Structures are given as C-alpha cells and as structure tokens.
Image (cartoon, grey):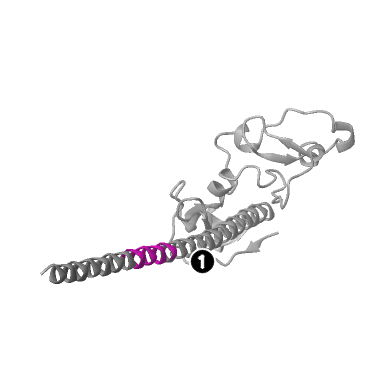
Amino acid sequence: MNHSSQVPSPSATCSGCGTTPRFSLIIHNVCYSAPNRHLCTNCLLKNHHGFFCPICYQVYDEFLPLHQRLKCLRCPSVVHRSCALPFSTTAVNAGSAPFFLCPTCSDVKFSYFNLSAADRISRTVDEKSFKVLSAASKIAAMSMNRGATAARFEAEWRAKEAAVCRKRAMEAMEELADIQEKEKEEEEEENDGCVLDLNLDARLHVTEE
C-alpha cells in the first residue's frame, strides 16, 4: 500500500543531520526553547523518545497506564506492552518488567525513515513509512502548538508586567508630586513667616524712634 505525499518547498535542511527534503520528503518545524528548529523525520523521532510507540508508531496523547507500557532500559522510549509482547496478555505480565530495548538503542545505525531511490522519485511511501511520517508530523504539530501556547502566555505575562510597571511609575510620580507640593507649601509658609518678622521689626524700629 503506497501513499502519495504532497511535499512543501524544499528550502530547509535538517539541523540535526543536514539532510534535505530530497531524502526525507519533509523537513518538520519543531519548537524548542530556542528559535524553531528544522528536523527530518528520523531526527525528530530520535529527539522525542517517549512521545510515541517505536513499534506501532502511535503518538501518545496521554501517559499510558503502568500496566500497559514498557520503558527502554537505556532511554526514555516507551512502548506498548502489547506491541513488545504480542503473544502475552497485559494481565499476565502486569507485575513483571521484561527486558526491553527500543530500536535505536538496539542498533545505533537504526533509522526510522528510509526512502529508496524509487520512492524519492515517485514521492510515495509504503504503509510503515507512512505511519512513521504521520507520527513525526503529529509530534511536530504538538510541539508547535505548545510553542504557540507558551509564546501567548509569555506575551500575556509581559503585558501584565508592563501594566504593573506603568502603575508603579504613576504611583511614584504621584508620590513625587505630593512631596514637591508639600515642600512648596512649607517653603511658602517659611517665606510668609519671614515677611511677618520683617514687618514686626520695622514697626518696632519706628516705635523706638
């Protein structure tokens, strides 16, 4: 079963391995704490262990219950227990922790996504590669959505922080204006007192004469 793929403009290269859409079909946009990165399907999946089952390539929308999963002994990769142990039931093995290594830990040369020369020319993939590509695309979309949410929260936080700063600045200006007004009133009172003293001295001087 083959699936055709509409490929975007091949302008980006993978920041992980340097491959181009010619060999990976799609270069995914992924949001990290740093500016967005471009990753091929293989590098994206290798950088997101634990987000998907490395056997059936189902992306996890939520954490699997403990009795339904197995964790790789060397990395955060999590597999469906039913995928790793197809001939055993989850009930029987719920209390055990079988030895499990994900494909990338079992074979350092393992690649999730390999295209033959014919597939690159025809821009088609087989069913397994289609599942891999779909998983990577979904993870990339989840990453970008999280990035957009984080950016929105940061923008809202900065807006609130700016509003607080403006409020504090206004309060400081009002307090300064009150201090200046009070100092002005005290200065005027002192000047009035000096005028009264001068007038009194003048009258006393005239009386003495």
The answer to which image quadrant residue 79 occupies is top right
Within 10 Å of disc 1 (Cα), the crowding (few <14, some 14-19, many 20+) is few
Q: Can you give x and y, in whole percent of width and height, for residue 36 in the image?
A: 47, 56
Q: Is residue 208 above or below residue 104?
A: below
Taking 136 as reference, is 198 left or right?
A: left
Specify the quadrant that holds the N terminus: bottom right
- Name which residue lies at 60% across and 37% down: 104
Numbered label tally: 1
Whether residue 66 appears in magenta in the rendering, the answer is: no
Q: Do we see residue 89 in this rendering?
A: no
The answer to which of 101 and 156 lies nearer the viewer is 156
Q: Residue at x 40, y 62 (%)?
A: 172
112 is higher (above) or lower (below) than 208: above
Q: Residue at x 89, y 32 (%)?
A: 92
Q: Nearer the viewer, residue 120 or 42?
A: 42
Residue 32 horizontal/vertical position (percent): 51, 51
* Residue closest to the eye, 187 or 154: 187
Residue receiving disc 1: 8
Compared across the picture, whether 177 is left or right of 200 comes to: right
Q: From the viewer's perspective, is 65 left or right of 59? A: right
User: Residue 131 appears in which quarter of the rendering?
Assistant: bottom right
Task: Check disc 1 and give the amino acid type.
Answer: Pro
Rendered residue at 57%/67% (across/down):
6
| Residue with the most extreme left position | 209
Range of magenta residues: 171-183
Position in image of residue 200 (x %, y %): 21, 68
- Magenta stretch contains residue 175: yes
